[in-house]
Amino acid sequence: MKLAGCALCETEGGLLVFRGDKFRVIRAEEADFPAFYRLVWNDHVAEFSDLPVSERALCMEAVTLIEAVLRRQLQPTKVNLATLGNVVPHLHWHVIARFDWDSHFPAPVWGSAVRPSDEMALAQLRARLPALDMDIRQALAAMLATL
C-alpha cells in the first residue's frame, strides 16, 4: 500500500543500494555522514508493530546484516540504529556508521556539531562507498535467497 504525499512512498528516499519485495536500502545523502543507510519498508506502514511477526523478523535480520557489513568493512567506533518516523511516518530504520573523528561524535547525527568536519577522513570514507554498497547489496541478496 502506498500513501499519497508520503515522501518514502513517492521517492526512493536516497541513493538506492538494494531493492527487494518487502524493503529497500538507500544511502542517505548526508555530507558529514557518508556511511548513513536507511532500510525503508516498501509498503506504507507507520509503526514497526504494524508488521506481522515474520516481517518484523525479516526487517531486523536485514538491519542486523547492514550493521554487520558496516562493522566488517569500516570498523566504525559505533553503529547507530534508530527508527524515528516523526517527520516521515513511514517505517524506516537508520543504520549509521559513526567514527570518533566525525563532526558530531559522540552526539547524535541530528544534534549540533562538536568539531569541524574532517574533510580528509570524509574523502577517504566516500571513496569506499561503492564497494560498501556492493557488499550490502550482495549480502542482502544472499540472505533473501536462503528464505
Image (tube, helix red, strand yellow):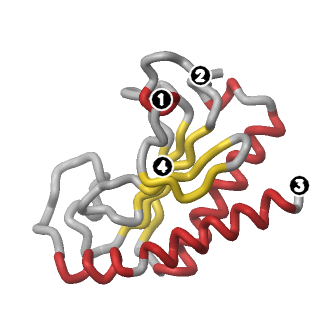
Mark 1 lies on a secondary structure that is helix
Quarter of the image that includes the C terminus: bottom right
Q: Residues within 10 Å of mark 1 (few under 14, many from 20)?
A: few
Above or below: residue 17 compared with residue 131 = above
Q: Nearer the viewer, mark 1 or mark 4?
A: 1
How far across and down, in percent of the image, does residue 67 sit?
A: 57, 64
Q: Which residue is mark 3?
A: 147
Question: Looking at numbered disc 4 in the image, what kind of residue is underneath it?
Answer: His
Q: Nearer the viewer, mark 4 or mark 3?
A: 3
Q: Which residue is mark 4?
A: 94
Quarter of the image that includes the N terminus: top right
Q: State yes or no: discs 1 and 3 in contact (Cβ < 8 Å).
A: no
Question: Looking at numbered disc 1 in the image, what kind of residue is underneath it?
Answer: Glu
**Quick one: label 2 or label 1, which is nearer the N terminus?**
2
Residue sitting at 44 percent across and 56 percent down?
27
Q: State yes or no: discs 2 and 1 in contact (Cβ < 8 Å).
A: yes
Q: CA distance from mark 1 to mark 3?
A: 28 Å
Q: CA distance from mark 3 to mark 2?
A: 25 Å
Q: Which residue is mark 1?
A: 10
Residue 5 sits in quarter = top left
**Quick one: label 4 or label 3, which is nearer the N terminus?**
4
